[in-house]
Image (cartoon, grey):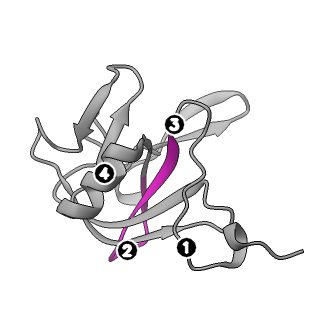
């Protein structure tokens, strides 16, 4: 059975029980997976208004604009939402590394046989 949430054109994010939605960020030019973060309604609205990725920090319990301290902002080119509107996909132009470690992507390690293996920078 079809419903508006899955098939309609009305934006109606499915916030979780904490008022958050998952956001996946990829590089708009290369397609590289950069990071995953969470947004609340306020950070989502700020992101749409400013075209800069802004999130809810679950650890700090506050709004944070990616790059507000480092200068490595994420310029939003496109925002998509999945079929049941519980996950966002932001295609961005990164103004520096996505990861707080300085790595281009937060996904710079492989899990192999229960261990972590760092991927060489030229292979990420």
Q: Are marks 1 and 4 in contact (CB under 8 Å)?
A: no
The answer to which of 2 and 102 lies nearer the viewer is 2
Picture quarter containing residue 10? bottom right
Q: Is residue 115 left or right of residue 47?
A: right
Which label was assigned to residue 69?
none
The residue drawn where x is 60% and y is 51% is 14
Chain part drawn in magenta: 20-34
- Of pointers 4 and 3, the one earlier in the residue sequence: 3
Residue 100 image position (x, y, % from top left): 27, 34
Q: Secondary structure at mark 1?
A: loop
Residue 119 image position (x, y, % from top left): 46, 46
Q: Main secondary structure of the magenta part?
A: strand
Residue hosting label 2: 30
Residue hosting label 3: 19
- Of pointers 2 and 4, the one earlier in the residue sequence: 2
Q: Secondary structure at mark 4?
A: loop
Q: Secondary structure at mark 3?
A: loop
The residue drawn where x is 11% and y is 35% is 69
* Residue 23 magenta-highlighted: yes
Which label was assigned to residue 10?
1
Total marks placed: 4
Distance of label 1 from label 3 (alpha carbons):
19 Å
Distance of label 4 from label 3 (alpha carbons):
29 Å
Q: In front: mark 4 or mark 3?
A: 3
Distance of label 2 from label 3 (alpha carbons):
31 Å
Residue hosting label 4: 104
Q: In front: mark 1 or mark 2?
A: 1
Label 2 crowd bin: few (<14), some (14–19), many (20+), radius 10 Å: few
């Amino acid at each position: 059975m079809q419903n508006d949430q899955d098939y309609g054109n009305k934006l109606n994010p499915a916030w979780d029980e904490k008022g958050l939605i998952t956001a996946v960020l990829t590089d708009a030019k290369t397609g590289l997976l950069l990071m995953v973060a969470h947004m609340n309604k306020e950070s989502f609205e700020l992101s749409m208004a400013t075209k800069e990725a802004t999130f809810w920090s679950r650890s700090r319990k506050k709004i944070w604009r990616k790059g507000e301290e480092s200068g490595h902002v994420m310029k939003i080119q496109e925002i998509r939402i999945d079929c049941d509107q519980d996950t966002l996909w932001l295609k961005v132009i990164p103004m520096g590394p996505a990861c707080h470690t300085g790595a281009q992507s937060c996904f710079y390690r492989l899990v192999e046989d229960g261990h972590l293996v760092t991927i060489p920078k030229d292979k990420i």
